[in-house]
Amino acid sequence: MSKEYEVVIGLEVHVELNTKTKIFCGCSTAFGGAPNTHVCPVCSGMPGSLPVLNKAVLEKAIAVGLATNCAITENSKFDRKNYFYPDNPQNYQISQLYYPICRNGHVDIQTEKGETKAVRIHEIHMEEDAGKLVHDAFTDETYVDFNRSGVPLIEIVSEPDMRSADEVIAYLEALRETIQYLDASDCKLNEGSMRADVNLSIREKGSSEFGTRTESKNLNSFRAIRRCIENEVNRQIDLLESGEKVVQETRRWDDEKGYSYSMRSKEDAQDYRYFPDPDLVPIYVSDDLIEEIRSRQPEMRREKALRYREEYQLPDYDIEQITAEKKLADLFEEAVAAGADAKKASNWLMTETMRLMKETGTDAGKLCFSGAHLAELIALVDAKEINNAVAKEVFEKAVFAENISPAQYVKEHDLSTRTDDSVLSSVVDQAIAANPKAVEDIRNGKGKAVGAIVGYVMKEMKGKCDPATANQMIQNKLKESGIM
């Protein structure tokens, strides 16, 4: 009879903070750019260069710590983590080992059973990112790009509190949501601004002792994280069931091939020869600074959801959709503030906005239109200046793509609904005469046949009339003729 095992997982999550400049110098942190163009003597590790802490990095790290229920360290400092690697220009990384900026927090998640569970955070520390190695398979050469070297990171280290891949994903989603709402990072896993190291071990159910853990490095998609965890659980169980031991090591997950391989034996802290960085002064965080940052904390998703339910009476589904991304919630509030009906604004965001985001591959953070223009579009529909079909065209071409006034676009492209009753009446007469079968069906009690006549009118009017108005006029004429 095979044994039952329990999975024990802790995460080290690296998040690139979205400051304009690097953590210890004034170089740009913009993603992309020609290789080695966002560099200076400090972030390229030139002898004699001196780092200076970017205050915005400190403030964003504290903001994340407060939002994740951490205690803020009053006296903090930086340490040197010494190791050689080609993309590490100084041959050490400036990090925090002994006095991290945040400690002892937690994030609440929903388990598969629908229960609330607190995943404890051991610490959050600040550090600098390394550069990037670019491997050229054709020439069999490797190039080093130092643009990313010195980009500010926070590393969020959890306790080993997670017991499944589902809990890991729930924790990462909660972290991402919190950090995005704080505007501390875009948390784009595909661009490397959020990545996770998974520390995993298994033990017999009921045991209080931890098994030997492995670390899977730099996973940058939820899909890869889930597959890696499932693979590693099975690998460790197979080892134990066959009488072998799990070796403590760092492993690399290849998501394309669906397997992991050993990189190196797992280092301990003493292997890095940490010592206090002599070039950086200690950090003193005053109560006044903490309170100032706390006062700037935004309304978080759960608070926003409660308010939307009470203030706007939106359905839970709508609330879940539009608060999932802070940018969508901001657009919703801008539109309502500009006079739009809350439910109509929500509908436009959930349908047309999300459809176009998917079709164009646009992230919510890159949406360029204003809530005011969305409200203006809704007002045009409400006033029957344009119909729904035209409104969708105007939204896509004017609002979503260009962020220009929908009223201006309607005027310039002659899209306004025609309100001349005499013109519409003439077209309705023509439509009735051109659709004898539909008229006969209506005479025989098939009221839905009116749709064919409405469609004819819309085609003749080139969509520039209100379908409801056309429908009502058709029915009035049919009644006058004794057909209905």
Image (cartoon, rainbow, N blue to C red):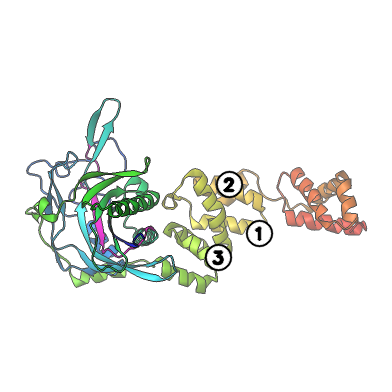
Q: How many angstroms separate mark 2 from mark 1 (CA)?
A: 16 Å
Within-10-Å neighbours for mark 1: few <14, some 14–19, many 20+: few
Provide the secondary structure element on which disc 3 rests: helix
Residue 16 visible, this orientation: no
Q: In this view, does 322 lie to the left or right of 178?
A: right
**Which residues fall within the magenta stretch?**
145-165
Question: Which residue: 36% across, 46% down?
Answer: 190
Nearer mark to the viewer, of 2 and 3: 3
Q: Where is residue 75 in the image (x, y as percent from the top left)?
A: 13, 66
Q: Is residue 127 left or right of residue 455?
A: left
Nearer mark to the viewer, of 1 and 3: 3
Judge by depth and name the residue closer to the eye, 418 or 31. Answer: 31
Within-10-Å neighbours for mark 2: few <14, some 14–19, many 20+: some
Q: In this view, does 210 lie to the left or right of 335?
A: left
Quarter the C terminus occupies: bottom right
Task: Name the residue beneath numbered marker 2.
Answer: 409
Provide the secondary structure element on which disc 1 rests: loop
State the residue lying farthest toward the bottom: 310
Q: Do the residues labelled 2 and 1 touch (CB within 8 Å)?
A: no
> Looking at the picture, which amino acid does disc 3 mark?
Ala
Judge by depth and name the residue closer to the eye, 168 or 88. Answer: 168
Sequence-wise, the earlier of marks 2 and 3 is 3
Within-10-Å neighbours for mark 3: few <14, some 14–19, many 20+: some
Q: How many angstroms separate mark 2 from mark 3 (CA)?
A: 24 Å
Residue 101 visible, this orientation: yes
* 131 to 156, vertically: above or below: above
Q: Where is residue 300 in the image (x, y as percent from the top left)?
A: 39, 66
Provide the secondary structure element on which disc 2 rests: helix
Q: Position of residue 212 (x, y in %)?
A: 23, 57
Q: Is residue 162 magenta?
A: yes
Task: Name the residue beneath numbered marker 1.
Answer: 383
Task: Name the residue beneath numbered marker 3.
Answer: 342
